Image (cartoon, rainbow, N blue to C red):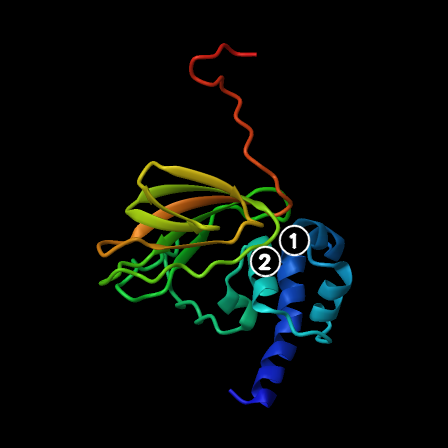
Amino acid sequence: MTDEGVADTLAAMAPRLRAARERRGATLTAVSRATGISLSTLSRIETGRRRPTLEVLLQLAKAYGSSLDELAGTAPAPAPAAAGPRVPLPPRPGGDKVVLPLTRYVGGLHAHKHVLPAVDAPPARPRQVSHDGYEWLCVLYGRLWLALGEQDLVLSAGEVAEFDTRTAHGVANAGPGGPVEYLIMFGPQGERLRPRTPTPGRGAR
């Protein structure tokens, strides 16, 4: 795509971002508090005066319960006579990750189900990112490679990890084998899960 085409795409994205926020009934101030993106940045993005980065778009997609394709206007049109709920296609070897939002509100903890496609060969070490927040991760199926700082952990079904997302982290299918399914609870402002049951071996307080 040419620079002119990119500019046109970003300009067309501004009203879609505003419409996505308004569908949620959220103010710019509420979105700013929930995502950590400054109010001025959000305002400039929605008026087309600033280009959103991929990280910002990912945060907004999570906050609005939308996909990047929907925000960019590249999502395929729905079938005219589709009946029943839309079910994502199962991942194929070499395909992209599937992300299913399980919460559709702005602020507080967010829940997502992720499915990593099957791989045919051992993967490279996952690319790591870091950002504000706190994450709780639980593997449902398969084997997940979690690169957390200098540590390399392979989690199997039923195993859980939690960490401050300011620590560099990344995940990959530990394959080769089938797909990996896992749940994520993410607190963009550092919110954490709060157990209410007593720790085994200790009485309730």
Q: Quadrant of residue 139?
A: top left
Q: Is residue 131 visible?
A: yes
Picture layout, residue 101 above or below residue 2: above
| Number of residue marks | 2
> Mark 2 belongs to which amino acid?
Gln
| Residue appearing at x 43%, y 55% in the figure | 99
Disc 1, SS:
helix
Residue 26 is at least partly visible in this image = no
Residue pictured at 55% horizontal, 55% vertical: 130
Q: Amino acid at mark 1?
A: Thr
9, above or below 157, in the image: below
**Residue 178 in the figure: left or right of residue 55:** left
Residue beneath disc 1: 35
Indicate which disc residue 107 carries: none
Q: Quadrant of the C terminus?
A: top right
- In the displayed structure, 7 sits above or below 40; it is below
Residue, far front: 150
CA distance for labels 2 and 1: 6 Å
Q: Nearer the viewer, residue 156 or 2?
A: 156
Question: Counting other residues with Cα less than 10 Å from the Cα at mark 1, is it few (<14), some (14-19), or many (20 or more)?
Answer: many
Would you say 202 lies left or right of 55 here? left
**Residues at discs 2 and 1 in contact (Cβ within 8 Å):** yes
Q: Is residue 148 left or right of residue 52?
A: left
Question: x%, y% of residue 86?
Answer: 38, 56
Q: Position of residue 92 (x, y in %)?
A: 27, 63
How dense is the environment of label 2, judged by Cα within 10 Å: few (below 14), some, or many (20 and up)?
Answer: some
- Give the SS element for disc 2: helix
Q: Quadrant of residue 62?
A: bottom right
Q: Which residue is mark 2?
A: 59
* Image position, residue 152 (x, y; %): 38, 49
